[in-house]
Amino acid sequence: MAVEALGSAHRVKVAPWNDPVIRGWVFQIVVVGLVAGLAWYLVSNTIDNLNRQKIASGFDYLGREAGFEIGDSMIEYSPASTYARAIWVGILNTLRVAVLGIFLSTILGTLIGVGRLSPNWLLNKICVWYVEAFRNVPLLLWLFLFYKLISEAFPGPKQALSALWGSMFLSNRGLYFPVPMADPIHKWMGVALLIGIAGAVALHRWAKKRQEATGQPFPSILAGFGVALGVPFVVWLLGGAPHHLSWPELKGFNFEGGTVIQPEFTALLLGLVLYSSAFIAEIVRSGILALHKGQSEAAAALGLSRGQSMRLVLLPQALRVIVPPMTSQYLNITKNSSLAIAIGYPDLVASINVTINQTGQAIENILLIMAAYLSVSLSISAFMNWYNKRIALTER
Amino acid sequence: MSDDALPGGERRQLAPPVDESGALGWMRKNQFSSWGNGITTVVLIVAVVWILSGFLDWAVFTANFTASVGSECRGGGACWALIREKYRYIFFGSFPYEQHWRPLFAVIAMLTMLVTSADRRMWNWRLLVIWGLGSFVTFLLMFGQIHIPLSLFLTIALVLGGIGMNLRKAIAEPAEMNAYRALAAIGLVGLVLRITGILPAWSLAIAPFSYVETSLWGGIPVTIILATYGLAFAFPYGVLLALGRRSNLPLIKGLCVGFIELIRGVPLISLLIMASVMLPLFLPSGTTIDKFLRAQVAVILFAGAYIAEVIRGGLQSLPKGQFEAADAMGLNYPQKTLLIILPQAIRVVIPPLINTFIGFFKDTSLVLIIGIFDFLNTANQALVDPNWAGFPGEVYLFAAFVYFIFCFSMSRYSKYLEVELNKGTRR
């Protein structure tokens, strides 16, 4: 009987309260019901409270005048701009510090991770203690320390330290340096840069194909850089080579002209990069250690140079181990950039926090924060997953 | 030459050449093996000596340890007198000054609790006793007075009875089983009676000291409490989330995945801001919820999602045979999970769990943004005193040193445990 039941398709009859499928559904409905009940309870309380405190709801406030200053903005902004624009400034500031932070800490972290594997005892120990020191202290403490040091240790604008024959000024208001005067040709140079990069990629593909077909190598990386930078340069020459610079000058209590790297931004970027690179160093080290020694020996036996074996044999394999933890590290950098609020760098959370305080509309604003961070996080992980798939081992 | 040759073709053992042994040989091999290596070494030595001598000069030789006011420190090196003056505030915040022994002993109680739980011989029922006792002592010292309501006792009875009934089903003697049933029944009936108002709102009052409210708590006990109880409460709920995420029930799985990814996708600051501005809106009007508790809730919510992902790693590392064997033994789901699966899964992830805990310990510093006086915030406040303004480096380095000692010892412990737990599987 039992054997028949096992072999045939029809199921053993059981009482409905012992049937795992029915049990599963009942359990799920109960749990979802509880969650929905809790949600309804919270929402009804919230609506009640909002009505009582006469707080408006909806996103209408986004179109109203923000009325607060933002010290550091990549786009044009004044207190007369709308809340939406203030929040957009915040998003751009978050993205700026996150992208720069990811880029710089990857470079520094890789150098330190490789340094930890160096046969040079002194270099090795320095890298070990760098990692331990930065990993075991909260990022927020580093941010405070750097910010206070920059704003208190550097002199005021009148006694600013000048460098490079008075073209750059370092003070507690930040680092001022000259920039080219705005010129219509800059827009076209940007377009030319994009075209140049596309050309470099195409060149690299062509070089790879040619090498596979004929065995002839082509210095596509060097040539690629030439193309990517050369095209904008030609456009600049064609545009009459405008070379007027805007120089920073001390006027009253602060500098005018030129452009500035704010101390808040510097402290935040410095803290993020030093802190995150300690983690990235560990990831890189474990990625390289995970490789079998035979790989580098085989590459050497084939006659590849050190650089070639690193680029063509070792790195592509180490990357498979490195990319997944690196993805979560990049996400951490993005999320950690929100600590900006503590030292007054106007990132997304800081703008929204002011907006909450001014409008009282907490829920809409918190939803905006969550939506913004989720979409940034999801796009970073989507990109890294795509990259991971590209470098993954193709198993047959 | 003939001296070296011994009878039987053996050769006399010669001492290694001087330049390959001893300190000089070590230097040659490790620091000056090639031109590039040698240059690196020289540059590094110069840099280290330069930085270290500058730092020591500032921190030790020209430092001021005895000044009674900040202005006496100016112009010299580090002003450690500031730390001397303010260390009680930095460690214990605004807790009543003459009562500072209370947070001190609370910290000692918590550290004892954590250190004894680190001992592998305690990883059984003793852990519950240690944590129960440790928490009781900690909160009694911090609050000074504790009122334990009747409903808490009833809830504990219900939970204990329920766990016993499920876990020991078909294993326990009938008498033991009946005891669990009785416990659960007392808890359930009592709770119903309490909610309907038939049982009075009685509570057990233990009040040996004066009451100190949470807004006066500060410094190192706050940091340790937020991290420790954040983890302690987040752990069971992280386990539930992880189990839910691995479940084959679609609705449960969807809920857990959605929750975990939502929490992990946003920064802790946004959760803290949410807890401080939105939690009051969520509750019926008139109820106020303690600011410290709000921060603790946010930390727990945050920690749970991260712990869930760590535990999920452990669950995924178990071979399918373990699940199937438990099913074949006729164990029900709680028995299978609590007796077979989780003990093995958690064992695998203890080292990463400790690393997660180190992360929380550092992340608790973010609560200063919503105005909780944790260790970093009290250090920050110590800078505000106009008598001592202008020495941020000293205070932050001191705070960094304290954080470093905590986190570094935990990471060493996690490394040790990783080796210790893998002894069985290491080749």
Image (cartoon, rainbow, N blue to C red):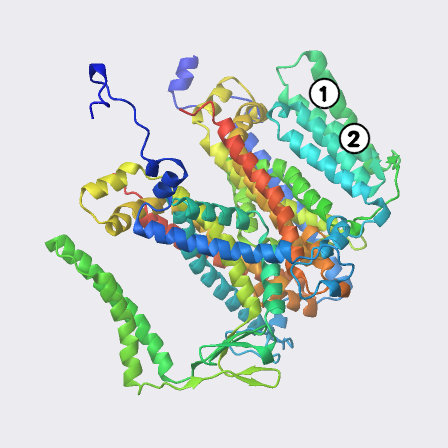
Residue, disc 1: B180
Apparent side of residue B107 relative to residue B320 in the rendered image (left or right): right
Q: Nearer the viewer, residue A226 or A377?
A: A226
Apparent side of residue A293 relative to residue A369 in the rendered image (left or right): left
Badge 1 or badge 2: first in the primary sequence: 2
Real-space Cα separation, disc 1 to disc 2, in angstroms = 13 Å
Apparent side of residue B328 relative to residue A31 in the rendered image (left or right): left
Is residue B381 in sight in this rendering? yes
Residue at 52% x, 79% y: name it: A76
Is residue A334 in sight in this rendering? no
Q: Nearer the viewer, residue A39 or A379?
A: A379
Give x and y (percent) for residue A334.
51, 57
Residue count near mark 1 (Cα–Cα under 10 Å), binned few <14, some 14–19, many ≥20: many
Apparent side of residue A135 relative to residue B45 in the rendered image (left or right): right
Q: Quadrant of the C terminus of chain A?
A: top left
Please determine whether, in this image, residue B229 is positioned above or below residue B47. Answer: above
Give x and y (percent) for residue B163.
67, 26
Residue at 62% x, 31% y: name it: B118
Amino acid beneath label 2: Leu
Q: Say yes or no: labels 1 and 2 on the same chain.
A: yes
Residue count near mark 2 (Cα–Cα under 10 Å), binned few <14, some 14–19, many ≥20: many
Please determine whether, in this image, residue B351 is positioned above or below residue B183. Answer: below
Indicate the quadrant where residue A18 lies: top right
Judging from the image, mark 2 belongs to the subunit labelled B
Judging from the image, mark 1 belongs to the subunit labelled B
Residue, disc 2: B154
